[in-house]
Amino acid sequence: HAAAQYKLGNCYFRGIGVADDDVAAYAWHSVAAASGYEKARNMLGVTKSMLTASELEKGEAMAREISERIEKRRAGRAE
């Protein structure tokens, strides 16, 4: 799923099919990078460099929320 998360981050980064949103791009790249996806790690630095400190905080919070939702879904399927 990390590749899909990375690709979704790219869609937000480039505004492909969604509104251009660097905060959301950072969040999705962060989630993919945490899953070990190397391309996401590389892109994370690019995305991060475009954010203000406030936007970075929002992106980190969004990434945590996304990760928590993913874990809840995984836990629900395991039951």
Image: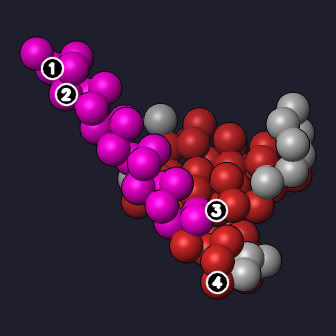
> Given the current orientation, which residue lies at the most extreme left position?
79
Say which residue label 2 marks: 75
The residue type indicated by label 2 comes to: Ala
Q: Residue at x 55, y 73 (%)?
A: 57
Q: Earlier in the sequence, mark 2 or mark 4?
A: 4
Q: Which residues lie in the magenta part? A: 58-79
Element carrying mark 2: helix
The residue type indicated by label 1 comes to: Ala
Q: Is residue 73 magenta?
A: yes
Q: Magenta stretch: dominant SS? A: helix
Q: CA distance from mark 4 to mark 1?
A: 38 Å
Say which residue label 4 marks: 53
- Callout in the foreground (4, 1): 4
Q: Classify residue 9 as left or right of residue 29.
A: right
Q: Nearer the viewer, residue 59 or 48?
A: 59
The residue type indicated by label 4 comes to: Ala
Q: CA distance from mark 1 to mark 2?
A: 5 Å
- Residues under numbered marks 1 and 2 in contact, where contact means CB atoms less than 8 Å apart: yes
- Residues under numbered marks 3 and 1 in contact, where contact means CB atoms less than 8 Å apart: no
Q: CA distance from mark 3 to mark 2?
A: 25 Å
Q: Is residue 43 magenta?
A: no
